[in-house]
Amino acid sequence: MKNYQIYIKLFFLIPVILLFFIIRIFKNFRINKIISHKIGHMTIPIEIYICEKKDDPKKIPVIWFFDKITANHFLKKKWSEKLLILPRHVLGPIYILFKKYKFFNMFLEDFSKDSEGVKRSIYNGVKHIDDKKVLLKYKPTIEFNYKEKIEGENYLKKIGFENKNFFVFASRASSFHNETGNSVRNTNINSNNLGVKFLVSKGYKAIRIGRRDITKLNFSDFNIIDYANSVDSSDFLDFYLISKCKFVISAPTGITRMAALFRKPSLVVDETNPSDLDRLPDRIMLLLKKFQNLKTGKIISFQEVYEKKLNYIGDHLELNKLGYKLIDNSEFEIKRATESFFNLLNNDISLNENLQKQKKYWQNVEEHFGFKNKSTIICPDFYLNNNDLFK
């Protein structure tokens, strides 16, 4: 928004600003923005806020407004039912004004006394970390009304999944955000094929979820639905399907945040950056991409990756310029991780035992990112086969 447009809008909003000052005499409050242009930012930070408010009713209330772009209109509707939200054209310019001048800091959320972990998680003025551990203390905020339940169950009946155990799986494609570059987070959905087929052999049904990924599954099975490329795909069904699934298998995308919203365990494959794991509340398993030195051809240790902050590089070309490249997880690696994840969910793998075996790596993560892990393990098979990378 151009400066002169903001000033014009602020001129007409002077009565609202004065009203805020009057209200604050009697009631303390803050204003903040819901980062709604990406589903990951639109989910967990707001869920954390709502759960913290349940945990502490005296927590200072926040008046919210949405971004100009909304990643999911169903979620926008649900948050609007739970939060005090003002129109963006009213609160947006005021928020910009308040952020620009320290005089108005009383109206903004203050994280200055919070932990370093919280401060690291702040993005656009919003906290992304569940430092008070409220997500597992409270049930999911999003609830479906009678009409929504009927619509959701009708879809499951249509595809033959009614009353069936199913999971959802996903990848990330540049087409979703119309990216011009090549994000290191992008993956090939068909790398999941062997793992998905394994779970189907164990009696599960599967639904491929996501948006605008033009890559189709390269095989067909009536137990596996490519919902992402179907005419049925919708903002509502995205959430309903995740709410009803048993677990999620995905590359690091907003879908893992949607899974966390419903407290669903996740297997995250092709992960490059473990620094935000504390945003996922339930036990999960990770499969990491490997980094290769282009000059020597050697795969480098994760210690070196984190020391050089290569995990923060978001584009393949930028990474190549620094002399490194990423190696995606192979279909076989993902299959082995899927098998291990299945065993973990069925208590055939000990979480604590593997945490102890992987202690040195997680100490390394804590040293570099401040994240103290208690519920996440690297796929045991991957860890064993690449033991030298975790030292």
Image (cartoon, helix red, strand yellow):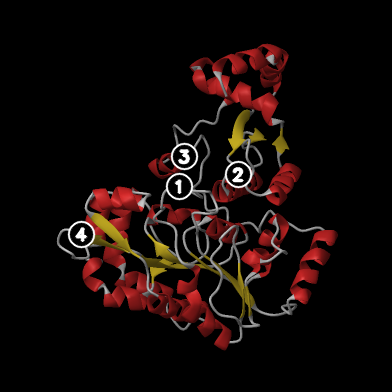
**Residue bearing mark 1:** 180
Which one is closest to the eye, mark 2 or mark 3? 3
Q: Which residue is mark 3?
A: 122
**Residue 114, position as x, y percentages in the image:** 45, 38
**Of the residues tagged 2 and 4, which is closer to the observer?**
4
Question: 235 above or below 329?
Answer: above
Instruction: Report the side of 376 relative to 223 (left or right).
Output: left
Q: Secondary structure at mark 2?
A: helix
Q: Quadrant of the C terminus?
A: bottom left
Q: Nearer the viewer, mark 1 or mark 3?
A: 1
Residue at horizontal 31 percent and vertical 47 percent from the top: 318
Q: Amino acid at mark 1?
A: Thr
Between discs 1 and 3, the one toward the N terminus: 3
Q: How far apart, in angstroms, are the residues tagged by discs 1 and 2?
A: 34 Å
Which of the numbered marks, if any, corresponds to residue 49?
A: 2
N-terminal of the pair, mark 2 or mark 3, is 2
Q: 92 or 183: nearer the eye?
A: 183
Residue 177 position within the rendered picture, expressed as x and y whole percent measured from the top left: 53, 49
Number of other residues with Cα within 10 Å of mark 2, as a class: few under 14, some 14 to 19, many 20 or more:
many
Q: Earlier in the sequence, mark 1 or mark 4?
A: 1
Amino acid marked by disc 3: Ile
Write down the quadrant of residue 24 in the picture.
top right
Crowding around mark 1 (Cα neighbors within 10 Å: few <14, some 14 to 19, many 20+) is few
Amino acid type for the residue under numbered disc 2:
Tyr
Q: CA distance from mark 2 to mark 4?
A: 42 Å
